[in-house]
Amino acid sequence: MARKMKIRAWDNGKNTSIKAIIFHPMETGLRKDKKTGKKIPGHFITEVTCEHNGKNILTCLWGPGVSKNPFISFNFNGAKKGDSVKISWVDNQGGKGGSTANIS
Amino acid sequence: MDTTRRIILKASMAASTLAVAAGANLLTPTTVFAAWPAKAFEAKKMDVAMNVITGKARPTTSADITVDAPDIAENGAVVSVKVTTTLPKVESMSVYVPVNAFPLSASYILSSQMEASISGRIKMAKTADIIAIVKSNGKLYTAKKAVKVTLGGCGG
């Protein structure tokens, strides 16, 4: 599989910053194929979970209204350098993925 | 593993949500995911989508929520939105675009470790308000931001 996501996690001096991008088409199910005129089936991420040292910190529930190759950025407290951050996702067609990063 | 995946993908594309559910079951991820509120995301009307998330309660407008988005978005397919609030004990934040085919864009469930500020990118069909609804200390609050869209991002 191609590289499906990127995470960056770093200590910003005050707490921890996370930036992540997931490579996904986020197809709404409303667009039509210009050649065939048929609707392109919806294909989008429904849930993303973010964990710090195995503990859930953020759950994202997404619909087709989130842009292609979704990007998310947030800060959280209570972590230190070297801790692991894991982000996993599932989509409406049963696809899934995820990645981990250590806080730098 | 990968072959199974392909088959499941094909099945779910061809058939109904049942196939999707079955596929999801077979591929149960190591992480346990909360139930995705399909009704809220499939709702085509703003109030229907909102009711699923908020129940019958109506949020009150709050000056403590900031919806940060560009005044003019050239491309409705990618509009950066940042929702920040100074309200205490934030449990969830949801982002709506009432004019979209599916008004609910995203909903975030925050743990106590989180800072109440999340940025992401959403699609907008046309010029509209982006509405944020924040649940703080068991109560609902809302704020909005008007964004002018020059090129819609949901059509085909």
Image (spheres, coloured by chain):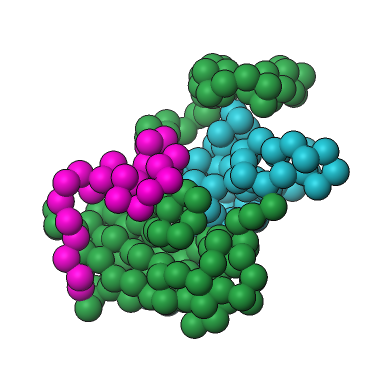
Instruction: Identify the residue shown where x is 60% and y is 56%.
Output: B154
Check if residue B46 falls in the magenta segment: yes
Q: Is B86 on the left-hand or right-hand side of A95?
A: left
Outermost residue, front side = A37
Q: Is residue A83 above or below residue A96?
A: below
Report x, y in % for residue B93.
Answer: 32, 58
Q: Quadrant of residue B113?
A: bottom left
Q: Quadrant of the N terminus of chain B?
A: top right
Report x, y in % for residue A20.
Answer: 57, 58
Q: Quadrant of residue B95?
A: bottom left
Q: Is residue B110 above or below residue B43?
A: below
Which of B153/A52 is in front? B153
Which of B144/B149 is in front? B149
Q: Colour of chain A?
A: cyan
Q: Colour of chain B?
A: green
Q: Quadrant of residue A98?
A: top right
Q: What range is drawn magenta here?
A: B36-62
Report x, y in % for residue A101.
Answer: 57, 53
Check if residue B38 falls in the magenta segment: yes
Report x, y in % for residue B134.
Answer: 26, 60
Instruction: Identify the residue shown where x is 45% and y is 60%.
Output: B99
Instruction: Identify the residue shown where x is 56% and y is 43%.
Output: A45
Q: Is A57 on the left-hand or right-hand side of A25?
A: left
